[in-house]
Image: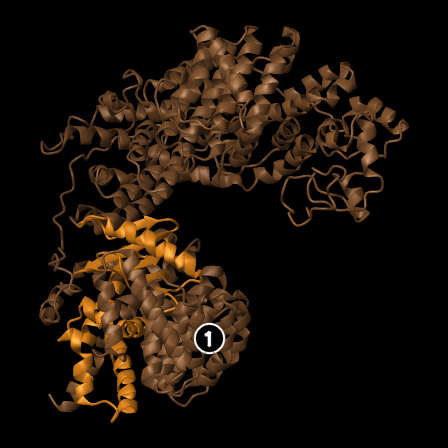
Chain colours: A brown, B orange
Amino acid sequence: MDLANKVAAMAKRTLPVSGVFDELIRGIGESKSKSEEDAIVGKLIELSKQKIREGRREPRSQKELLVYLIYIEMLGHDTAWAQATAIQLCSDKNLAVKKLAYLTVSLLLDPASELSIMVVATIQADLRSDNFLTVCTALSAICHIASPELVSVFLPQVTALLRHDRDLVKKRALLAMQRFIQVDPGVAPDLERHLIDKIGYKEPSVMIASLCGLRELIRRDPAPYRNLVHYFTNILKQAAEGKLGRAYEYHRAPAPFVQLELLRLLGLLGAGDRASSENMYAVLAEVKRRAEPLGNNIGNALVYECIKTLTTIHPSPVLVAGAAESVSRFLGARENNLKYAGIDALTRLVLIDPKHAQDHQLAVVDCLRSPDVTLKRKTLQLLYKMAGPSNIEVIAAEVLVFLREGGDEVARGDAARSLCDLAERYAPDHRWFVDTMNELFEAAGEVVPASLADNLTRLIAEGTGEEDEGADRELRAGAVEAYLELLDRPKLPHVLLKVICWVVGEYGCLSALSTDSVMDKLAAIPETQASDDEVRGWAVSALGKLAAQSGRALTSDASALVSSAAAAESVQLQQRALEVQALLGMSAATQRAALPYDAAAEDVGVDADLPFLDSFVQQALQNGAAPHLSLDDRTAMGMTRDDGGGLGPLPHASALKFQAYATAPAPQPRPAMPPPAPAAAAAAGGMDGPSDLDVGGLSLSQPAGGAAAPAPAIAAMPAAQNSAPAAALPSAGGPQLILNKPGRKWGGPAVAAEPSPRSGGASSSVSSPAQPYATSGSASHSAAASPSPAAAPPPAVDAAKQRLAASLFGGGGSTSTAPGLRGRRSPAKPAGASKPAVAAPDLLGGMDVSAEAGAAAPAGAAAPPTASDMDLLMGLGASVPSTATASNTAAPLLDPMAALAGLGGMQQQQRQQQQQQQPGLVALADLMGNGAAVAAGPNMQQQAGAGLGFGDFLADTAPRQQPSQQQQPAAPLMGGPSKAPPAAKKDPFADLLG
Amino acid sequence: MIRFVLLLSRQGKVRLAKWYTTISQKERAKITKEVATVVLARPAKLCNFVDWKDQKIVYKRYASLYFIAGVDQEDNELLTLEIIHEFVEVLDKYFGNVCELDLIFNFHKAYFILDELLLAGELQETSKKAVSRCIEAQDQLVEQVKAGSVTETEFASFSGPRG
């Protein structure tokens, strides 16, 4: 080796920095604690600051500084003090310094930072440089700092660089364009032509760069680019045949990265377009055929991408069959990575044809039982796609197991949401739904969305929706019993506790226990459970309801809880307790009027104008009160405020600037309100001085001080009305309890949609949409009965696994052999066969309407929001403050208004608020339910299609034992070289590339 | 696209961090910490992918270093694994048997190589040879500038950590 080479080789491994830095890095490597490390970084920072102060111009010193900065930043310390220096160094003449400075800037600078503007001029100058490396560096920097404002600044120069004579520059210019499209889609039309021009470029790396840019465009709107399909298929064919040259070969695969990029493009272009898709079939098959025998990771990546593509485009039966074979190879592999890819691919195939899942049931169950959470989660996603009425119970049980195991919050949240979604869609009966939800709350209460609790309470309050009081009563009594039992367990999640309080409060009298012991149980909640003020508040309200409905006094425990709550620090809790105490002191008739039994779901009309106050308003006006100005009036007069809490100015208003705290709920001064104080004072009967204003005024100044006090309560109502349609539409992702359909069955509409054209083979025997349960149930039953002797499982396979697989994939017949899966369910009630007895009447009832709709449009009854639906939404919105407002506005009106000026008045208003909350919960759930049902139309159809296909039982239960094609050599792991002495450098590298 | 590339030591120390999305410094620190916890805790032989928040983490351990990439949901995990591997191969070719020490003391070189490979979160050069060529060209240019100013003795003092 000649000297030059030796020197070059050494140069690679030398730092442009001094031994001081070397020592510091070592120190950090050896430091044991964070504080030790921080101290060293502190030294490093000091060193850098010193360098900046010295401002030495020689390249070595400058490079050193930049390397320090990168290192400090990498260790997570602030570098704002040095950013300007780094930017300055970008314009250095020395290329090495310049490159390093650009790198530092791209690492240090927050892309949103204003400082990035400072680099613009330097970059523009560098783009004009003669040295192509400088130009390249500048183009890389553009990719990092590009922001919407800067795109137009750079665009002309970057476009001009496409004519540069170096391919390297052209490539980077194209990639910079891609970045431009990402940050500012508006420039796409200008760049489109340049990108398309370069597809045919002879140098592959430039061509690939243009593909990246085109992907951005195609992802936004594929339609205009469909004519490019034949270019892409041509290039893909050449790439697969290795015509791009050996330089692009990677582990025996010819240009795999190019192939993958093209496959992705084809997937985007072919989605939903049959003609383009058909043009791709041949080349897709070819790519897959060539990639298959490679057997290494890159080959598998290609096959996997092929499957992804061919499941996105219009499906071809031949290709799909081929894909299914590859999937079985993946699933049979020993490597988890391949299993993961296999499960993902299978999830895609199942959407095309559910029958594919049956071939791999044991592999799927294996993955489900894998210790690898990633794999498990992916498998659960597959199960969601496979779910249907016949296997929902097994799937729900699996999801619950997953949730109980704990883990990542996001994963659990996803699982919980999916379970709710499925349970609402396919629940066999109400009781099962309530039970499942209870288990869900118990297993994962902290990640369950609050709306779900509302759904559950609403379901219990409304019952089945039919005129069958007995069934409703049974459901509620069952729920109450279950909840009272649950209360004996420790550490229930908050959501569940709230649901328990509400349900027991509302329907506690249905319990077999005496009302007194129910009360005691509720009163014990704060002690037995880790509860906060909120839960205590719910418990107090529940006690109030129980006592009012049963006409009994609170037990001693219960009244102790209420009195302690009445002295609580939390104002809301205190308020509730005081209300309960006050209400229970009144006559039984008043109590029952205020808190009637089972009225949570009743509709109550409310007149938002509060006409019953008219006479009072008149009186106040006659006494000289100022007329009320609505918020609009005040805004028009320039006296704006932000919320409804404005009262007359407090005495000390001028001394403190409340204006600054715009969002605080505290009373706000209204500077220009003409005679504000007299208004409220007059309303309060001129009783007290300003100090009492906020108490007296709160409930009484309704006409004068503005709808201020009642505003929070009442304003909610029109707001709910307005938001009803709005909330209904975009909530597709939300829960979808479909209760307002005539059938009032969660499964109703979804089931009606099942015999959709997509469900293909397995369900094609289902002719009448009105009886899917019965048909699929019996079909699966008979199918299960007949072939099972033939399909004798190989002895090696775990029997339990078999059963699970059977119940997941099969349907009714075989579930009965696995009663242990869900202990609480009676063995005599397997998924399919015996169910119709229970479910059919409901279903048929629910289906007379949907069957017609289903016949006309397979999308099912759930799709269009009919006028009556909307009315219902509106009606419910209006009834939000229902019972409460109506009943107690009626009652206290008889009392002299003066009584309201004091605490009584406050209580009345508080009661309004409190009671409004409870029906509000239900009403909101209603809105959600409806909205979701409306929005879920197409989605549901697809799911249903996927769900029903498992009607008949698979014949082949034998596991596919595919010998693992390829085995990554397990890389030997060495001890950390960071600790190793420099002399030991020799060997750690062999294993780095196992 | 690739959203970030992280190199972590077994102890969770950052060896290299590159971000391709516009997120604040604070956010970066948070992600680094969380990703380190997730990845370092995973036993060997599980799959190299983790679903994490709205993205997927693809990681691979080479000796004592974890190479980690955060990618979009729709990305091909197996491919990302290969991109990581290609990065390692190029590093290996450049340093000639790369080890963690090379990356500790020459992290800026590693950044340069990564920049040649990935730009704006996309694979910009798929040919290993082209990447190496480009890096060599830059090194030579730097050497030309340096020529004469660097002596053998200086080299000796710099190459301390490598022996």
- Residue under label 1: A84
Which quarter of the rendering shows the C terminus of chain A?
A: bottom left
Asked whether A775 or A92 is in front, the reply is A92
The part of the image, by quadrant, that contains residue A497 is: top left
Query: Along the horizontal axis of the image, is A976 left or right of A696?
Result: left
Q: Residue at x 25, y 92 (%)?
A: B147
Asked whether A19 or B81 is in front, the reply is A19
Q: Chain of mark 1?
A: A
Asked whether A136 or B104 is in front, the reply is B104
The part of the image, by quadrant, that contains residue B6 is: bottom left
Asked whether B57 or B141 is in front, the reply is B141
Q: Residue at x 12, y 70 (%)?
A: A985
Asked if residue A59 is positioned above or below residue B43 in the image, the reply reads: below
Asked if residue B115 is positioned above or below residue A620 in the image, the reply reads: below
Q: x and y percent of residue A950 in the render?
A: 31, 33
Query: Along the horizontal axis of the image, is B145 left or right of A904?
Result: left
Q: x and y percent of residue A466 in the render?
A: 53, 17
For numbered disc 1, what is the local secondary structure?
helix
Specify the amino acid type for callout 1. Ala
